[in-house]
Image (cartoon, grey):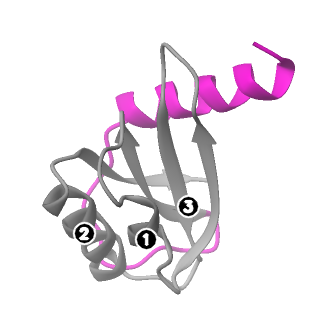
Amino acid sequence: MGRRGRWAAGALAVGLLAAGHVVDAATSAERWTVDVAWPEGDWQSCLDHPAVESGVVAPSLPTAGASVTLAAHAPRAAADEIAHCLRAGGNHVEVAHRRT
């Protein structure tokens, strides 16, 4: 695995382990993130949400998954919409509020 792949895998692992606190909106230093491990089905269309600012996809073993960071102004409801779409496809999803 190359340097970029290790970074993506590490970022995903940290994202899947992190626990977020419940707040309604993010500050400029905090963003909502949505992480999915071993995505299945048409999961990529779920990440085409207008609130998504950036994303990382780790397609290789053993940490296949995806993580997206929402824009600073995005509310919890946007993260929940993305998570709901992913869960509808049978995916395990984590929503967290993280300092960037």
- Residue under numbered circle 3: 69
Give the label, 3 or 1, closer to the camera: 1
Vertical placement of 8 versus 71: above or below?
Answer: above
How packed is label 1: few (under 14 Cα within 10 Å), some, or many (20 or more)? Answer: few
Residue occupying image coordinates x 83% and y 17%:
2
Residue occupying image coordinates x 62% and y 56%:
55
Q: Is residue 58 left or right of residue 91?
A: right
Vertical placement of 69 versus 2: above or below?
Answer: below
Quarter holding the C terminus is bottom right
Question: Which of the 4 quarters of the picture holds residue 89?
Answer: bottom left
Residues drawn in magenta: 1-29
Q: Is residue 75 magenta?
A: no
Q: Disc 2 marks which amino acid? A: Cys
The location of residue 39, given as percent across then percent down, is: 35, 42
Q: Are marks 1 and 2 in contact (CB under 8 Å)?
A: yes
Q: Are marks 3 and 1 in contact (CB under 8 Å)?
A: no
Vertical placement of 73 versus 83: above or below?
Answer: below
Vertical placement of 20 versus 75: above or below?
Answer: above
The location of residue 68, given as percent across then percent down, is: 53, 57
Q: Which element type, helix, strand or loop, lies under badge 1?
A: helix
- Residue under numbered circle 1: 45
Q: Disc 3 marks which amino acid? A: Thr
**What separation in Å lies between label 3 and label 1 (alpha carbons)?**
15 Å
Q: Is residue 34 left or right of residue 60?
A: left
Q: Disc 1 marks which amino acid? A: Ser
Give the label, 1 or 2, closer to the camera: 1
